[in-house]
Amino acid sequence: MQNLSPELRSCIEECLRCHSTCLGMAMNHCLQQGGKHVEPQHFKLMLACAEICQTAANFMLIGTHHHKHTCRECAEICEECARSCEQVGGMEECVQACRRCAESCRKMAA
Amino acid sequence: MQNLSPELRSCIEECLRCHSTCLGMAMNHCLQQGGKHVEPQHFKLMLACAEICQTAANFMLIGTHHHKHTCRECAEICEECARSCEQVGGMEECVQACRRCAESCRKMAA
Amino acid sequence: MQNLSPELRSCIEECLRCHSTCLGMAMNHCLQQGGKHVEPQHFKLMLACAEICQTAANFMLIGTHHHKHTCRECAEICEECARSCEQVGGMEECVQACRRCAESCRKMAA
Amino acid sequence: MQNLSPELRSCIEECLRCHSTCLGMAMNHCLQQGGKHVEPQHFKLMLACAEICQTAANFMLIGTHHHKHTCRECAEICEECARSCEQVGGMEECVQACRRCAESCRKMAA
């Protein structure tokens, strides 16, 4: 990691944090709570967000210029996931992780 | 899988075949051959292609509308990987898998 | 893939088929059905099964001797997932994919 | 993540750090250096280590009891990867990340 730029390392960390938060909360909060927490549109978005965060991190680690495109897609999905979590309610940790990741990914995509 | 459309199932299969071909050839052909086969730009592209194919397949399986974006990115990287494999030479299997996957993903992205 | 043994290729295909079936059914059948289909123990098992199938396939593609261990773990989780799907009911496609994958992985683990 | 135990969270973080270090160094150090850094046995081990770290983290996030098995396998591969990095030389960051992850995973597997 030391031979990667600080901006890249920071964005990788945000992506991995957001991946962990989305997957962890989907599995250990949403499934337990049920109801609107497992409504397909919300739940699928949580898992799609976890997946694209992992991919965006891996693209930055591989070191390919295509990371700009995966970061842009990651930022969009994170924003949509944050809004969905706000509507469902009681998911502040996930809202925050998604917003921070989206902001970081937008910079990398520019 | 039976509740997914034939087009979606077909594209998922092409993505998984391309993922397997790129990862398998990078690890069991390129590393053995050495030389230009492990030149960073080519080798990174092989792994990035394997990764985006996996992600594109997973997005179609999750069933989110964002699969259009991951399929579009997948098609671009597959085309670039096919060209790189042609230049390196002796990688016809990979060229073919990438081209078929790119074609299938372009349809899903439309 | 052509430089991999037929046994290895066959097991990779079963793993990828089981991965697709488990992830696809969790997202497009279980979430829609609700009730016991999204009971945490069952649903987590579906996603853990999809994940280990992907990893077992990737280990065989990387071509490391550790694939024996990931195949053994994959066989165990697939069997448990098949039993859970039988108990929930209406998931024959998943039961079948899991059983076939478990059988194939047991041979690779031996 | 807040509803996961501190031990679990700590092990997830070590796994993700080791995943990033192994994938990042394979792609941005080993490929650049060439020679014994891209010798198949070493390079495959780096990628297998990155893969099992990601899987072990995901199993802990899913919250399945099978995480004990993936953590045990992760600890073994990390140790082997650390030894391989020591023999190749100039990969102290990777040796350290692998050793820390192995130690953390051994506790989770107990």
Image (cartoon, coloured by chain):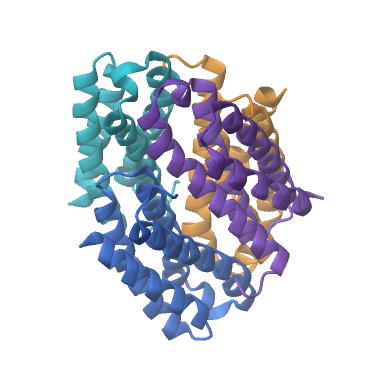
Chain colours: A cyan, B blue, C purple, D orange
Count of picture labels: 0
Q: Is residue D47 visible?
A: no
B76 and C53: which is toward the camera:
C53
B30 and B50: which is toward the camera:
B50
Can you name the residue that lies furthest to the right here?
A: C110
Q: Is residue B37 visible?
A: yes
B96 and C35: which is toward the camera:
C35
Q: Quadrant of residue B44?
A: bottom left
Q: Quadrant of residue A20?
A: top left
Residue C86 coordinates in the image, percent (x, y): 60, 32
Residue C95 coordinates in the image, percent (x, y): 60, 40
Point 35% across, 41% down: residue: A53
Q: In the image, B92: left or right of C78?
A: left
> Where B100 falls versus D68 (above or below)?
below
Residue C45 coordinates in the image, percent (x, y): 56, 31
> Where B61 falls versus C76 (above or below)?
below
Point 39% across, 25% down: residue: C34
C97 and C68: which is toward the camera:
C97
Residue D46 coordinates in the image, percent (x, y): 60, 53
Placement of the N terminus of chain C among the 4 image quadrants: bottom right
Q: Quadrant of residue A17?
A: top left
> Where B9 falls versus B97 (above or below)?
above
Q: In the image, A44: left or right of B15?
A: left
